[in-house]
Amino acid sequence: MLDGIKIENLLVLENEYKVKAIRLFVDSFYDMYTSISKDKKVLNDFFLNSLDFSLIYVAIFDNNIIGFMGIANNKKRTMHFDKAKCIELFGKLKGGIIYYQLRALLEKPNVKSDTDLCIDYITTDENYRGKGVATKLIEYACNNLGYKDCYLEVLSKNLTAKKMYEHNGFVEYKRVFNPVLLMGGGSIIKMKKQL
């Protein structure tokens, strides 16, 4: 476990940290979003304008963003898309399609109760993996945000992440097969932890 990690809400941090956080997010989830663009600069700009910083917590070590966690509740999720920005970045037709598809997939709340928390995204800088960064972020969310139950989803082929979630007290409660979202990742495992 790495000592000296600070967990901060991205909303209160200076712009330089926001840029670093978006870069980590895009690098980590690049394969999921290559159908939008293969240009990381475009993706960085797109997500800088689409992520709700009030719902993002980052792990900071030595002035670097080494972990990223986006959360959701029953009112809103981590991402909110702007149609004009989609059209500006991707053109009228492609931008419109991206806007409507991503809104349908990623904006609708995925938990029901006011006491439910969902971890939408979590990732660690590749240079700090295996050092407890994701665990620190999960502990922060579970112990400091005032919710009673925490939910998340993981692809069944991502055995390392599934094992880490189980180590942090999450249990599988459902598997969902969704060929549109999987991109070779297996089925979606829904997990829950009572706080």
Image: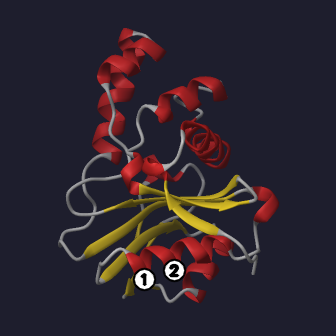
| Amino acid found under the numbered disc labelled 2 | Glu
**What numbered label is drawn on residue 139?**
2
Task: From the top left corner, tell me how far across and down residue 5 is, in percent.
Answer: 67, 70
User: Which residue was labeled with disc 1?
Assistant: 143
Q: How many marks?
A: 2
Left or right placement of residue 29 versus residue 66 in this view: left
To which quarter of the image does residue 7 belong?
Answer: bottom right
Q: Residue at x 77, y 64 (%)?
A: 128
Left or right placement of residue 22 versus residue 89 in this view: right
Task: From the top left corner, tell me how far across and down residue 11 is, in percent.
Answer: 43, 48
Task: From the top left corner, tell me how far across and down residue 17 is, in percent.
Answer: 60, 44
**What numbered label is drawn on residue 52?**
none
Work out how far the residue at label 2 is from the one at label 1, CA to CA, in angstroms. 6 Å
In this view, the residue in front, 109 or 173, is 109
In this view, the residue in front, 109 or 61, is 61
In this view, the residue in front, 6 or 156, is 6
| Amino acid found under the numbered disc labelled 1 | Asn
Left or right placement of residue 16 versus residue 177 in this view: right
Q: Is residue 99 above or below residue 112?
A: above
Residue farthest along the right direction in this orientation: 127
Q: Is residue 150 above or below residue 167?
A: above
Q: Quadrant of the N terminus?
A: bottom right
In this view, the residue in front, 65 or 105, is 65
Mark 1 secondary-structure assignment: helix
Q: Residue at x 25, y 56 (%)?
A: 109
Q: Residue at x 60, y 33 (%)?
A: 34
